[in-house]
């Protein structure tokens, strides 16, 4: 009986992930007609599980985007710091300015910010995302 419940749970997960009956039948060794019946019996659970999987995916994508934005922002900070020191042993001022412009453009693409958003607002938004990203795993919101 427990084996059947485990197979049903595995079926619901695989079906929520969008797997076909043929693939599921081969993976859990259950006939296709049984899977079709389970599909009807567990329709609501599969729909809910599918929503949860999709939400988890979207959260993970937000985290990745936030982390990319943080990396680009850190690089930009380093470039500004190098420019303010006016130590040009390894890079000309022109090259440093070009690098800063490229990093700013990259940050705008990663964060979705446009020119109309001030740097202070950008910093606040990034800080808010990072606080959310850092605190949420501690609260058990995301699992990797």
Image: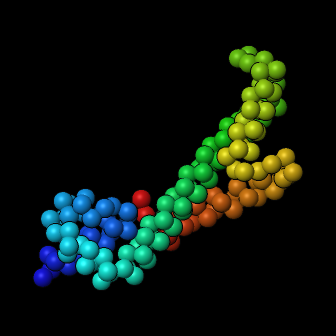
Residue 107: quarter of image: top right
Q: Is residue 10 left or right of residue 50?
A: left
Residue 80: quarter of image: top right
**Location of residue 26 with respect to 141 vertically, above or below:** above
Closest to the observer: 107 or 33? 33
Residue 14: quarter of image: bottom left
| Residue 45: image location, x then y, percent | 37, 80
Q: Is residue 129 left or right of residue 37?
A: right
Closest to the observer: 43 or 7? 43
**Location of residue 52 with respect to 105 vertically, above or below:** below
Among all residues in the image, which is located at the extreme front?
A: 33
Please report the residue visible at 70 percent of the width from the left and 50 percent of the height from the top. 111
| Residue 39: image location, x then y, percent | 30, 76
**Location of residue 124 with respect to 95 vertically, above or below:** below
Q: Is residue 69 left or right of residue 143?
A: right
Please report the residue visible at 73 percent of the width from the left and 58 percent of the height from the top. 125
Please report the residue visible at 54 percent of the width from the left and 61 percent of the height from the top. 58
Q: Is residue 138 left or right of residue 89?
A: left
């Amino acid at each position: 009986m427990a084996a059947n419940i485990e197979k049903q749970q595995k079926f619901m997960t695989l079906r929520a992930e969008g797997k076909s009956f043929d693939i599921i039948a081969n993976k859990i060794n259950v006939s296709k007609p049984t899977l079709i019946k389970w599909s009807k019996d567990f329709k609501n659970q599969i729909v809910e599980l599918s929503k949860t999987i999709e939400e988890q995916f979207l959260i993970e994508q937000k985290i990745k985007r936030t982390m990319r934005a943080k990396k680009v922002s850190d690089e930009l900070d380093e470039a500004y710091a190098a420019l303010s020191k006016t130590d040009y042993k390894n890079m000309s001022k022109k090259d440093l300015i070009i690098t800063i412009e490229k990093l700013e453009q990259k940050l705008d693409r990663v964060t979705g910010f446009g020119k109309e958003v001030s740097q202070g607002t950008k910093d606040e938004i990034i800080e808010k995302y990072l606080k959310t990203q850092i605190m949420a795993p501690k609260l058990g919101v995301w699992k990797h």
